[in-house]
Image (spheres, coloured by chain):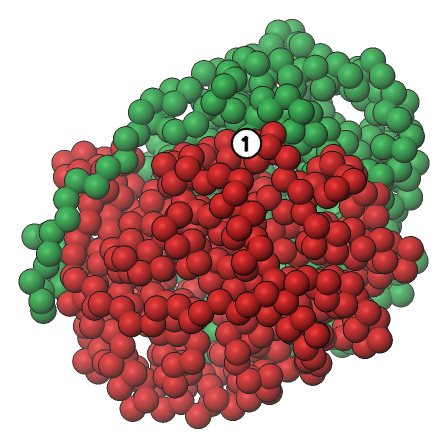
């Protein structure tokens, strides 16, 4: 649960956040389609006697329609019951088998994950139970109400996390009335209005074969994978593939938004429209952003904001490619009295980068890093699963992996300069600050 | 001149001795250099990758009042360069190689790592052997890094009411115990930290005989050993201060603190002081506590989730946490958030009821079997991550425990009986041994207060 994650963060104070680029694996991917339209992607890895199965639906909050949080609420009800089993019995059975399930929904994807041992006496019943849950879910009213309460509490938890508040506000401003504007969790008001009928309808519409993909990674043979894929998603009704999302967005207005929050540090996010996964400038922007703010301890933003001035603990920039145009975001946090100085430094760095682009040495180093780093991003079943999900969901070529290093190596300075000038327009930046109003006055005196 | 002497010593101590410790795992190799540095190599040939870690047996528990946060601030300083590698140079070198570099500090240890392509291992040893002895200390970098750490403290603690509450819990629970203060340090101590303190701390604790190197990945152990001798062998050791024993505290009363801060949700922490594997290396009690924590929490079938979340609906989050691998005794934590219909007091009563059940009723065999299956499956899943594998080895070694303990985990967990669990519940989960911290929210009212258009072409925020 989220709490655990918080706890871990708290204990270990590394010198910077780790920041990983999601790329794809140089691992052979087998791909087939079931008769109900569900697409299957399989990678055979024998090192650990385990299997990861991710079932992914195009059913993130971009599909909420006018009920903000519906996609996430629906996803959160997974595992609450079947005709014959209660939530307790389901959880007990998975534990007994040493299996783990978890589920999550973001803006594009809704996902359910099963991790299990591959010993047949454990694997088969885990897969079978998963299949029952997916094809024949029951949601008792008591469980629905409990989940609703938990979601409402999660909203409150977000409201005491300044960086999350900044993110939510940023997406709302950049995306206006379009589907990506929603906070995937929803709002207190919207969650209170989501009823069981809406959840059922959403599930029946989106959790269907034609809208499903299954990523199987682990120590199972191809024959086993075929059998498991039939069992896990082959029994879903075919249904319909949802229509494409709205793909034209109004240009964001340059705005500064101040959210008042009682704290001695201000969370800052700046952003604008970025790119989708199909963008032809993907590689120039990937390499170019690594130099600007992607490299965790080496980027220009890190150098100028933290290393030279000590204004922040972490600062980074990144494109979040999505099905349609995802955002470009720069994020940091700083003492209240340092907000203006930090923003000035960021704008100077950005403007200079847009004007002059990377130096030849920076470009060479960034390419070397991304190419040399590639094996590190595919060194575990977990990482490989994450990469294959992206390839499968966003329809990237199955050899995206094999050509990744070549593509990075080909990027030129001219391509980066042009791609940045074409994509990043600082006058469209939305700047969200979460901290005390008039932070300067309420800031702490330097010690 | 100092340099020349240093290099002479280099040659003298470079003939190191190898001691292959008897382990059942053929992919695990251990060595000790003549200067006392330990090397642990774990082969994993899945990907052409290597994770190289150096663990120093020093953490916030080695700090004294008035200088809290020193170990962590020094960790930051370790990235400020040496005469050989100036500021930022080593980060660039690792970056250029495609690698990743970072570090962490806890109560018990400070650990630095490089994750690299397996051909780049020498780079890691070059960096770590250099900065173990030759770190730059200058006022400008120190003051700047101090500001970075102050920002980090604000981010992780001061801006998170739960974290502040947890900090207060530790401050009352650990009366005479080195886990009393936060790893990041108290703000006042950070504000007044001096360069000399960091330099002295470095000279005291950063020495090969106080370090363990863990290398995991696609490597040849003998070659790693040769490389370690080449880079670390020349470093001269010096004795490190011995730490005084930290026995379990004699508690005579419960301890309680209520924290009032702007927040949206109340939060409850309850902590019982219990032994850890480090404080009781020969006892099975820590494993009984590990199983007890898993009975209470860990997945949807655990008791806290079942009873407090699903049956009674008294909590929206209810968690139990126990750290097997601490150096000293630590807190067995129960923590959670009550539902809006219930109070912190009711949640506390529910936690106490769960504890009482464990004291009065033996855990049913079937439930215990299920929990053990989960703990052991999790160990299999952990093998997927090189860093988890390396972490376990490094942590075990740094606590002075034999590495066989890692492999013995499954056997020891299997040997825990319902009676063992009942015994630790009765022994440690007493009223007198309990510390409580509650977070009582003050209003935050986040509200958007201004939204102004910036003229196009104008990039400056505000004035």
Q: Is residue B332 above or below residue A113?
A: above
In front here: B237 or A79? A79
In the image, what residue occupies the spot 73% across and 18% down?
B355
Q: Which residue is mark 1?
A: A145
In front here: A42 or A422? A42
Position of A115 with respect to A447 (left or right) is right
Q: Quadrant of the N terminus of chain A?
A: top right
Q: Quadrant of the C terminus of chain A?
A: top left
> Residue B62: x, y in percent?
57, 36
* Hue used for the chain lettered B: green
Tally the marks: 1
Q: Is residue A414 above or below residue A429?
A: below
**Label 1: chain?**
A
Determine if residue A279 is in view.
yes
In front here: A47 or A264? A47
> Residue A2: x, y in percent?
54, 42
Position of A335 with respect to A218 (left or right) is left
In front here: B375 or B21? B375
* Hue used for the chain lettered A: red
In the image, what residue occupies the spot 70% across and 34% down?
B297
């Amino acid at each position: 649960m989220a709490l655990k994650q918080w706890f871990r963060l708290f204990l270990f104070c590394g010198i910077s956040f780790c920041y990983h680029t999601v790329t794809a694996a140089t691992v052979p991917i087998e791909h087939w389609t079931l008769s109900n339209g569900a697409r299957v992607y399989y990678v055979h890895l024998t090192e650990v006697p385990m299997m990861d199965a991710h079932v992914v639906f195009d059913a993130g909050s971009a599909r909420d329609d006018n009920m903000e949080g519906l996609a996430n609420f629906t996803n959160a009800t997974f595992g609450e019951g079947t005709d014959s089993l209660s939530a307790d019995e389901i959880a007990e059975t998975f534990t007994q088998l040493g299996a783990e399930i978890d589920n999550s929904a973001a803006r594009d994807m809704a996902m359910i994950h099963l991790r299990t041992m591959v010993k047949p006496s454990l694997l088969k019943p885990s897969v079978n139970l998963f299949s029952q849950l997916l094809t024949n879910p029951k949601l008792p009213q008591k469980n629905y109400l409990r989940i609703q309460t938990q979601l409402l509490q999660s909203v409150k938890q977000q409201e005491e996390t300044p960086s999350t508040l900044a993110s939510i506000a940023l997406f709302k401003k950049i995306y206006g009335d379009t589907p990506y504007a929603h906070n995937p969790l929803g709002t207190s008001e919207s969650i209170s209005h989501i009823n069981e009928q809406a959840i059922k309808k959403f599930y029946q519409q989106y959790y269907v074969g034609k809208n499903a993909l299954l990523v199987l990674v682990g120590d199972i043979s191809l024959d086993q994978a075929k059998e498991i894929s039939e069992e896990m998603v082959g029994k879903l009704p075919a249904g319909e593939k949802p229509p494409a999302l709205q793909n034209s967005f109004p240009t964001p207005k340059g705005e500064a938004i101040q959210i008042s929050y009682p704290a001695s540090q201000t969370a800052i996010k700046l952003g604008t429209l970025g790119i989708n996964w199909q963008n032809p400038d993907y590689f120039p922007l990937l390499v170019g952003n690594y130099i600007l703010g992607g490299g965790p301890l080496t980027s220009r933003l890190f150098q100028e904001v933290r290393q030279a001035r000590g204004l922040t603990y972490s600062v980074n920039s990144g494109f979040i490619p999505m099905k349609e145009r995802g955002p470009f975001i720069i994020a940091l946090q700083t003492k209240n009295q340092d907000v203006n100085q930090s923003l000035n430094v960021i704008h100077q760095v950005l403007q200079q980068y847009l004007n002059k682009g990377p130096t030849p040495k920076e470009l060479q180093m960034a390419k070397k890093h991304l190419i040399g780093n590639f094996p590190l991003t595919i060194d575990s079943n977990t990482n490989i699963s994450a990469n294959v999900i992206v390839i499968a969901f966003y329809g990237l070529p199955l050899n995206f992996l094999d050509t990744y290093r070549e593509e990075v190596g080909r990027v030129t300075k001219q391509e980066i300069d042009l791609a940045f000038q074409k994509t990043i327009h600082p006058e469209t930046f939305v700047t969200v600050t979460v901290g005390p109003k008039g932070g300067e006055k309420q800031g702490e005196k330097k010690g | 001149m100092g340099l020349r002497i240093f290099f002479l010593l280099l040659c003298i101590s470079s003939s190191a001795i190898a001691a292959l410790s008897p382990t059942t795992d053929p992919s695990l190799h251990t060595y000790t250099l003549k200067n006392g540095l330990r090397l642990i190599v774990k082969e994993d040939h899945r990907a052409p990758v290597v994770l190289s870690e150096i663990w120093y047996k020093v953490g916030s528990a080695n700090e004294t009042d008035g200088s809290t946060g020193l170990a962590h601030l020094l960790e930051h300083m370790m990235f400020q360069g040496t005469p050989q590698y100036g500021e930022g140079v080593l980060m660039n070198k690792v970056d250029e190689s495609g690698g990743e570099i970072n570090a962490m500090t806890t109560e018990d240890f400070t650990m630095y790592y490089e994750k690299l392509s397996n051909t780049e291992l020498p780079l890691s040893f070059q960096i770590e052997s250099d900065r173990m002895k030759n770190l730059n200390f200058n006022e400008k970098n120190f003051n700047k890094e101090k500001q970075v750490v102050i920002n980090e403290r604000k981010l992780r603690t001061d801006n998170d009411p739960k974290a502040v509450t947890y900090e207060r819990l530790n401050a009352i629970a650990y009366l005479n115990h080195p886990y009393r203060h936060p790893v990041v340090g108290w703000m006042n101590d950070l504000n007044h930290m001096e360069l000399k303190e960091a330099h002295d701390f470095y000279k005291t604790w950063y020495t090969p005989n106080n370090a363990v190197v863990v290398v995991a990945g696609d490597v040849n152990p003998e070659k790693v050993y040769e490389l370690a001798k080449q880079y670390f062998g020349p470093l001269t050791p010096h004795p490190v201060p011995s730490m005084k024993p930290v026995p379990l505290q004699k508690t005579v009363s419960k301890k309680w603190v209520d924290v009032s801060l702007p927040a949206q949700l109340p939060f409850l922490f309850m902590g019982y002081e219990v032994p850890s594997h480090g404080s009781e290396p020969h006892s099975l009690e820590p494993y009984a506590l590990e199983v007890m924590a898993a009975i209470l929490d860990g997945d949807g079938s655990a008791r806290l989730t079942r009873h407090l979340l699903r049956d009674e609906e008294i909590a929206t989050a209810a968690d139990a946490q126990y750290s097997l691998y601490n150096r000293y005794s630590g807190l067995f934590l129960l923590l959670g958030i009550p539902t809006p219909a219930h109070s912190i007091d009711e949640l506390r009563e529910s936690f106490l009821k769960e504890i009482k059940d464990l004291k009065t009723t033996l855990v049913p065999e079937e439930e215990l079997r299920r929990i053990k299956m989960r703990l052991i499956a999790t160990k299999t899943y952990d093998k997927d991550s090189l860093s988890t594998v390396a972490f376990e080895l490094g942590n075990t070694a740094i606590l002075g425990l034999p590495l066989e303990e890692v492999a013995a985990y499954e056997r020891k967990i299997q040997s825990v009986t319902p009676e063992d669990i009942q015994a630790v519940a009765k022994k440690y989960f007493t009223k007198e041994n309990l510390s409580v911290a509650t977070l009582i929210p003050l209003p935050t009212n986040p509200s958007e207060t201004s939204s102004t258009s910036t003229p196009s072409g104008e990039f400056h925020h505000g004035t």
